[in-house]
Image: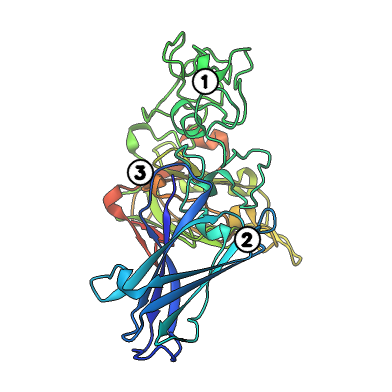
Amino acid sequence: MKRAARLLCAQKTPQGRAGARLGAVLSIVLASGGFEAAAAYDAEMVWGRVGAATQYKTYIRFVQGVGPAPTQPTRVISTSASALPETADGRAYFAVRDLPLGPTAVFSVAAVADGEESLRSNEMRLTYEQVANYIDSDGDGLLDSEEDTDLDLVVDPGETDSRKADTDGDGLTDRDERVRTGTDPTRRDSDGDGTSDGSDACNDIDRDGFGSSPSGTSSCRYDNCPYVANPYQADADFDSTGDACDPCTNVGGFQDAPQGAARITLRRVLRDTAPGDDLLKFRGSFSLPTNISFATLDPLTEGKRIVVEGADGSIIVDAELPPGELGDGPDRSGWRASRTAFKYVDRSDEPISGIIKVVIKDLGRRMPRGVLVKVNGVKGTYRVTQAALPVRVAIVLGDSGASRAGACGEATFTAARCATSGGRRIVTCR
């Protein structure tokens, strides 16, 4: 799927003659493009017209980005001013076709009037890291940034090939394997039974007698927990996720956060694909089941797990915070406890999933068996796509045994309760 990146050249001051500098502020927004697979992309430039201009020159130079060195150093494209389409507010726009992936493209524009060329506008850079979140080079339904997750144009272990729709050659596209069949898009035979995934009548990855059938002819029933053995397909809360892999066995939905009692904000996500600088903030309250009270919680010996799952089944966060008391030293991390609260702090250079602080507070005086949970993350890499919205948050107040016992809560947001802002770099669900 090829998409066009639109470069907005928002003119600062009106320019009436070509000899003046084109005062422009360049930014990037998503614009619709074609839907064919392509190893290149289009950029749409937009600028305020110069009244006397009869021609515009678009300058593009290519510098080293990721991958091999650019084979084309520059492009200069001259276009008649009268031939350029015009926006409703009078600006000109121009599409630059087939820009190579990998090199950084640097754009500027100049106006020509009476044979005199203006000074060029300020420059706009488009890096592979930016455009990879808009394009699908191999047409498999996954953006390049979802396949080349570290954005280096190298197929690393665990990644699929953004230039090849079927990385493992088993007859299923990479997206089908991730989303529809639950098989491994990097392994031709996910369950190791000698039959290719695309032809297998029962892909039983965890060998529990249940699986999926990408071929369309099934010899086994659907597995509600495809990667963890769940031989009886137990699903106590009937949420279609088996108990063996369900982060919160929330029977009857009694541990659901009431509407309005939970909020999650993810910053520097979606269009911002730079790793290691994403922010997460969650606050939510829910009630524990009748067999559990705040006094029985013990994250100092059991730890805690935080899961943020996308609507498409993607896992955005799965952080298991270890048990242990907060100690001394510059890299200390761990838990502190009081009669009414637990607090986790991680001041190390590489906090787990970027999470630096967690607070669990007893709300028993205000709501029966109620707990408030607050989570702060500042150095995470949270892969969020539009298909992942709305998200679901599960908080486990302990280990896997605590989860099965019901020491957990969930916040499930609807599409109407999730919004994007900040140029599609911030997600807020409430």
Towards the viewer: 83 or 187? 83
Residue type for callout 2: Gln
Residue 202 % position (x, y)? 50, 13
Q: Determine the secondary structure under disc 3.
A: loop
Do the residues under discs 2 and 3 have CB atoms within 8 angstroms? no
Residue under the image location 44 percent in, 48 percent down: 2
Residue type for callout 1: Asn
Residue 230 has which mark?
Answer: 1
Mark 3 highlights which residue?
256
Q: Earlier in the sequence, mark 3 or mark 1?
A: 1
Q: Residue furthest right?
A: 329
Residue 168 % position (x, y)? 60, 28
Q: Is 404 placed above or below 279 here?
A: above
Q: Determine the secondary structure under disc 2.
A: loop
Q: CA distance from mark 2 to mark 1?
A: 55 Å
Mark in the foreground, 3 or 1: 1
Q: Is 148 placed above or below 360 here?
A: above
Towards the viewer: 175 or 50? 50
Side of 311 where 166 appears, left or right: right
Q: Quadrant of residue 362?
A: bottom left
Q: CA distance from mark 2 to mark 3?
A: 56 Å
Mark 2 highlights which residue?
72
Q: Residue furthest left?
A: 88
